[in-house]
Amino acid sequence: MRYAKGTIGFTGGQSLVTGVGTTWLTDEIPVGSALTIDGVVFAAHVTQVISDTSLRIARPFPGFTGGVAYQGYAYTISDDYTAYANLPYPQNGDQDAAELHNRAMAILDRVFTG
């Protein structure tokens, strides 16, 4: 599952994420999914879906000024890839588990061999 509807906002140093044009609760975003911000080196797992426009992540946003509100960021929530290395993450019952495994191994090979 990949989800990128709307935009997000957050306050530096906090783990609460707000959405504009999002329907996280209605669309049943799974706890444990990875949230990444487009163009920013950051990823965290979703720990709580509070409403269609509010969720909580496992760790605060680093590298942003604490207490300052940031709005309008494009993002992706996914449970198909790991949050930190963006490796394919096979789900129970996936038809293409072997392909996902091979893609993950290719990524790791590039990381370790340059």
Image (spheres, grey):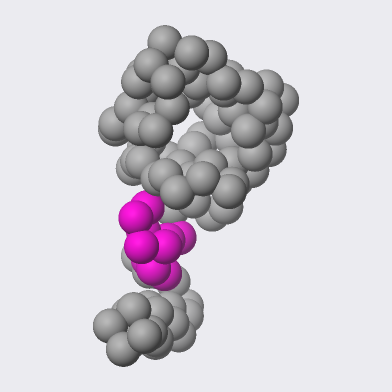
Q: Looking at this view, is 33 or 92 the one in front?
A: 33
Residue at point 42% right, 10% down?
Answer: 67
Query: What is the total number of numbered labels drawn onto the structure image?
Result: 0
Position of residue 107 measured from the top left corner of the image (x, y, whole percent): 39, 79
**Compared with residue 88, is residue 62 higher up or lower down, i.e. above or below?**
above
Position of residue 13 measured from the top left corner of the image (x, y, whole percent): 35, 20
Image quadrant occupied by the N terminus? bottom right
**Residue 33 showing in the rendered view:** no
Residue at point 53% right, 14% down?
Answer: 69
Position of residue 20 measured from the top left corner of the image (x, y, whole percent): 67, 22
**Compared with residue 7, is residue 41 higher up or lower down, i.e. above or below?**
below
On whether residue 83 falls in the magenta region, the answer is yes
Residue at point 41% right, 69% down?
Answer: 88
On whether residue 111 falls in the magenta region, the answer is no
Image quadrant occupied by the C terminus? bottom left
Left or right: 35 with respect to 109? right
Residue at point 46% right, 42% down?
Answer: 35
Left or right: 37 with respect to 15? right
**Compared with residue 106, is residue 80 higher up or lower down, i.e. above or below?**
above
Q: Which residues are magenta?
A: 80-89
Q: Looking at this view, is 15 or 67 the one in front?
A: 67
Q: Looking at this view, is 63 or 93 the one in front?
A: 63
